[in-house]
Image (tube, helix red, strand yellow):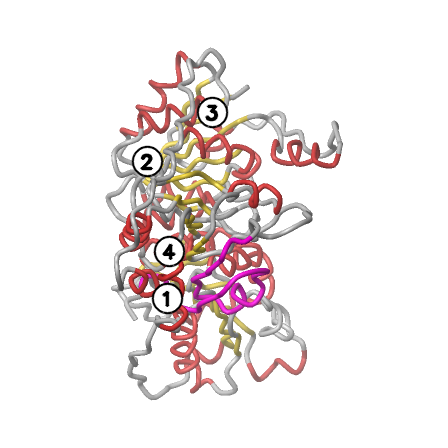
Amino acid sequence: MGITKVFGNPGSTELPMFRDFPEDFDYVLALQESIAVGMADGYAQATRNAALVNLHSAAGVGHALGNIFTAFKNQTPMIVTAGQQARSILLYEPFLFADQPTDFPKPYVKWAIEPARAEDVPAAIARAYYIAMQPPRGPVFVSIPIDDWDRACEPLAPRRVSQTFEGDRILLDEAAKALGQAHSPAIVVGAGVARDDGWDEIIAVAERFGAAVWVSPMSARNSFPEDHPLFAGFLNASREAIVQSLSGADVILIAGGAMSTYHVEGFGPHAPPNAKVFQLVDNPTAAACAPVGVAVLTGLKQGLAALLAGPAPASRPRPPTRAPAPRLSGEVLDDRYLLQQIASLRPKGSIIVEEAPSSRGAMHDYLPILDRDGFYTCASGGLGHGLPAAIGVALGRPGEKVIAVLGDGSSMYAIQGLWTAAQLNLPISFVIIKNGRYEALAQFARLFGMQRTVGTALPQIDFQAVARGLGLPAAGAASSETLDAALTNAFNAAGPTLLEVVVD
């Protein structure tokens, strides 16, 4: 299947798996199970192939569930295996066994099995791979009793199973015709375009129809160059704000995501009045729960290519170009200035992996993502994914510079991952935005009229000391005068580094 790495943190019920472990496989060790899943998520996204994860029985699966949930929301193909106690003693509820193992990770795996016989384990793993890779892609789960590894089985030949599909041509033609006749078309792009490698196709569609291109709320990938003249900006996760941003559009194409991902309660219409809405998506659930419009189930690369067929559209005025954010002087070292300087100093072609929720808006304005597959974050809203995902992306794209932009609160959910980055000597610059609190919660509390939040302060964390203790070189910057040199040193390093930036 092209899989030669196992991500995990082993326990006693997995040890027989390592007997005669193949020389051409690598075991990527994490110091906690959720970090193993986060690394596998980043690696699978970077390689566009399923990743293999090895977890320990019920306790290990429990530790990992947060990032399994994120992998499910990211639509990341992943085979999660977990140890189980020996079949002969399961009746007696032995130490470290998993009770109802296939139910435990649900509903955030596409399929789960503990094979009835040891001889069925290879076929179960093969089926898990095929299911993980079928759209919508996602994690699957196989529980393997400890004594199964030493049972002889018949060899199993891999099969070719389709991993994509083309949508209803009648509906795709209808969408193309509507876009061709539109006076003011708009496109909303989601992560599915990037997952299906539809970068070239979405640019061609936007240029063919002269459509303004927006990014769907909470999109976890970059699907359109943010310096393109047709790029319009980012939709907020609010019903009223989405309708306001898209006001004036008479045809809206949603590609690879949802226009209606809301984070706060809203009222009124879900789309501008009289606008025709077409959604291209590979996820039946997303198609079914969309509140308005025509949904077309399709692979995004194929579906977008189908929109390029047919007669050329009538000429129309192009939408106005999005004005760039004003250049900051650095009088105040805040997250906006930090992100502006990262954008200015980053190596060409470097990859941004982000988990800094309170700085996402600033990143939209000051750290534009310009290159295909140049950005990864988590679609679930859970924390603890970004740091290990950066490691997985670096493993999946060897030789490329990865810049992990992390909040101080977010990074502490998976800080042990720094050890793995150090052991593998990966070219990752970890940049910690240190504001001393869970700033995203303070911002969100204001929506409820709260001026004070409890349990959100994070004093006295020395990230440089933590990084050095886990094997990474570390530095700090607390002023605009020292920031550029610190960023340049981090970006020029061949191995992993951590930079702690104290922001106002």
> For mark 1, what is the residue?
299
**Gap between marks 2 and 3 measured at Cα:** 18 Å
Residue 486 position (above or below residue 103): above
Which circle's residue, 3 or 4, is located before the other in the chain? 4
**What kind of residue is marked 4?**
Gln
Which circle's residue, 4 or 2, is located before the other in the chain? 4
Depth order, front residue of 247/9: 247
Q: Is residue 237 magenta?
A: no
> For mark 2, what is the residue?
227
- Neighbor class of circle 4 (other Cα within 10 Å; few <14, some 14-19, many 20+) is some
Question: What segment carries the magenta color?
Answer: 274-301
Relative side of 436 to 185, left or right: right
**What kind of residue is marked 3?**
Arg
Q: From the image, which quarter does the N terminus lie in?
A: bottom left
| Residue 181 disc label | 4
> For mark 3, what is the residue?
336
